[in-house]
Image: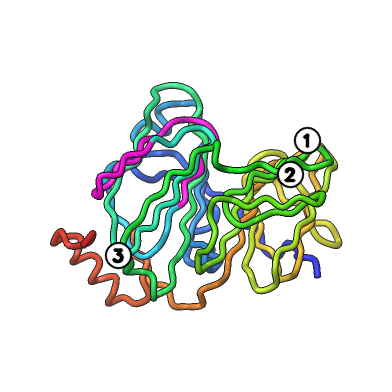
Amino acid sequence: MQRQLQQLIPALATSDGAGVRIKRSLGQSQQARLDPFLMLDEFNSESKDDYIGGFPSHPHRGFETVTYMLEGHMLHEDHMGNRGDLKSGDVQWMTAGRGIIHSEMPQQEEGRMHGFQMWLNLPAAEKMKPAAYRDIPASDIPTLELANGGRVKVIAGSVTADGTTVEGPIQGLSTEPRYWDVQLPAGATFEQALPKGLNAFLYVFEGDLTIGEPPRQLKNGAAGVLSDGESLTITAGEQGVRTLVLAGKPIKEPIAQYGPFVMNTPEEIEEAINDYRAGRLAG
């Protein structure tokens, strides 16, 4: 059964951190989530005034953050002593777990800064596990070249096309995430198995595409939540398309969120706030 376009979530312009201009699709309200995904932000500007303030030191607890840099240079530093440069094509996969305090600051004063940050929830059993951090350089993220001239960059999960299977560097998580960057020339089609029971959405950031029967269009700057099904088929529009494909196993647990803390109950949120104020957040 093919997945259909079920809901459109146009990205809204807003700001975060120290005035960084972003577009937020998932996560713009509590109703605009898709278990296990909490939020997706796109940042994209050539003006330093839109990004130079960066994201000074701040806490997280109870989920994972995934930053994918298309163009630009950011520096991550955290309370565990990790320090990592995030450059064009790189990914940072950070598990906040019981707590992490970190900063993400631009290392450029001119040129384009373009990328994404996604928040991925953790089940209750994992929310208080030790924090972890992984830098994934672009050279470690495989790209599958398609026979139709398209390509798929596989960050998490795997993709099979033309008899070849490529596995991304992120495997074995309880939410079973798929994170693909799919680029197609005009009129080209991408077909892929996407197991039933996984929640999935697309985010188009270049061109447009059509999906489903009858075909529905998904334009640049919008997320498209997909119906359940066993496979995904998308077709690029006249200008071609570049889209993120994200899918994951729903956790099906209550969500309590206060800013950078995502737990299951209001009491756990209160505990996180108190821990942060008392210097206990990160253990």
Q: Residue at x 69, y 44 (%)?
A: 152
Label 3 residue SS: loop
Answer with left or right where residue 260 lies relative to residue 234. Answer: left
Which mark sits nearer the N-terminus, 1 or 3? 3
Query: Is residue 141 a member of the stretch shown in magenta?
Result: no
| Residue 259 shows in the view | no
Name the residue beneath numbered marker 3: 98
* Residue type at the position of mark 1: Gln
Q: Residue at x 75, y 62 (%)?
A: 193
Circle 1 Cα neighbour tier, 10 Å, few/some/many (<14 / 14–19 / ≥20): some
Answer with left or right where residue 184 lies relative to residue 121. Answer: right
What is the magenta segment's predominant secondary structure?
strand
Q: For the residues labelled 1 and 3, say whether their Cβ atoms are less than 8 Å apart.
A: no
Q: Look at discs 1 and 3 and give the one toward the viewer.
A: 3
Q: For the residues labelled 2 and 1, say whether their Cβ atoms are less than 8 Å apart.
A: yes
Answer with left or right where residue 26 lies relative to residue 95. Answer: right
Q: Look at discs 2 and 3 and give the one toward the viewer.
A: 3
Q: Is residue 188 above or below residue 276?
A: above
Name the residue beneath numbered marker 2: 208
Which mark sits nearer the N-terminus, 2 or 3? 3
* Residue type at the position of mark 3: Arg
Circle 2 Cα neighbour tier, 10 Å, few/some/many (<14 / 14–19 / ≥20): many
Which mark sits nearer the N-terminus, 2 or 1? 2
Q: Which residues are magenta?
A: 66-84
Query: Of all residues shown, which one is farthest toward the top?
Result: 110
User: Which mark identifies residue 239?
Assistant: 1
